[in-house]
Image (tube, rainbow, N blue to C red):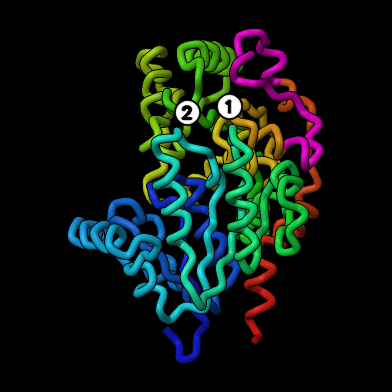
Amino acid sequence: MKKNQKQYYVEFFNHNNFGDDLFVYTLCRKFPEIMFHTNGKKDKVQSLKKIENLYIHYDNWIKRKLNAVLKRVYKKQDLLLKYRSRHCKGIIYIGGSLYIQPQDKWLKDYYLNSDRLSIKGKSFNLIGANFGPYKDESFLNHFKDKFKEYEYVCFRDKKTYRLFQDLENVNYAPDIIFQIRDWFPNKKINKKDNEKNKYILFSLVGENVIKNYEEYIEQVNIWVKEYLNRDFNIILLSMCKEQGDLETCNNIKKLNGDCDRIKIVSYENDVEKILEYIYYAEYVVGTRFHSIVISLALNISVFPIIYSNKTINMLKDIDFKGKYIDSNEISKIGFAWVDYNRCNKNDVNSDELAHEAQKHFKWIQNNLNR
């Protein structure tokens, strides 16, 4: 660490989820002159340990137990977070679906955990998130009051922004990951050189993520077979093993016996490997939110399968003109609908989106020279 180097503490969902890891990866790439701090269990943050300007405070069961006791004693304070961030100028809370209203029995703990992220005397910045779904106005009003206390807030969808637009510190920008085109790929390659290995990439989700799972499996398998019949190879992509994506990939693979033209790729601590698989794809059939965002950012044709409002909100915000399908309607469409975006380019203005997405980092950028 350099003398007088600015430092910030980063809170995020540290559970080997590709999208959340990519948030941190992008933040650190954007500001190499800043030393960032974060925490996590060793086996949950392995993909981030190679980042030179990120210091990871590793958790173990002793630290977690001690912190739990301290939280009960000191109520609204997270003393371990306070200690770890003692040299940091501020705290950055970065993530996507951070504000989903829990069941009533968990609501009190949810509020307490949210409160503990704020530390007196340190700026608090919320970036990259959307709000909801929620069912009670009291939940919304609680966070309206809470967000007033934050230094800077930038949401990734206009629907959320409109909920809080009366707060002066609240902003909107497209998803943080649209900035990926600023640093990936490092050099363009000629895809025609890879014609024999052309493939369709399917980003899949686990059973607990999508409602009509059996129907989802059945339809995806039909599309896989259609592409195999058209001489494409298939990549089945798991972006979050912990949430069941890999199990879904295995289920699809089993339905096709020993077919050697189907390959499973699972996110295992290598961010750029996953980016490369998406970049080299002939076409992406994407369920995971960030498989869709990355495809759009890199001008890769994509067919979105929507299991959450966050995806449809994003597509509307950026004026996406291509075909897509709600997962609840997945059995009502034919293969031609799925394949439409491959044959009919529907690129968005990725340069403009990348520029606008930088607004998430506006507060950090403005404070660099202070």
* 80 relative to 174 in the view: left or right: left
The answer to if 325 sits in the magenta stretch is: yes
Q: Given contact means CB atoms under 8 Å apart, are the residues at marks 2 and 1 in contact?
A: yes
Q: Quadrant of residue 172?
A: bottom right
Question: For mark 2, what is the residue?
Answer: 209
| Residue 280 makes an appearance in the image | no
* 370 relative to 67 in the view: left or right: right
Question: For mark 1, what is the residue?
Answer: 307
Question: What residue do we see at 39% from left, 35% from top?
Answer: 105
Viewer-proximal residue, 160 or 55?
A: 160
Q: Quadrant of the C terminus?
A: bottom right
Question: What residue do we see at 68% from left, 39% from top?
Answer: 300
Q: Is residue 196 above or below residue 259?
A: below
Point out the residue furthest to the left here.
62
Q: Amino acid at mark 2?
A: Val
Q: Secondary structure at mark 1?
A: loop
Instruction: Where is residue 358? Give x, y as percent.
Output: 70, 62
* 366 relative to 291 in the view: left or right: right
Q: In whole angstroms, how far apart are the C-alphas of marks 2 and 1?
A: 8 Å
Of callouts 2 and 1, the N-terminal one: 2
* 153 relative to 215 in the view: left or right: right
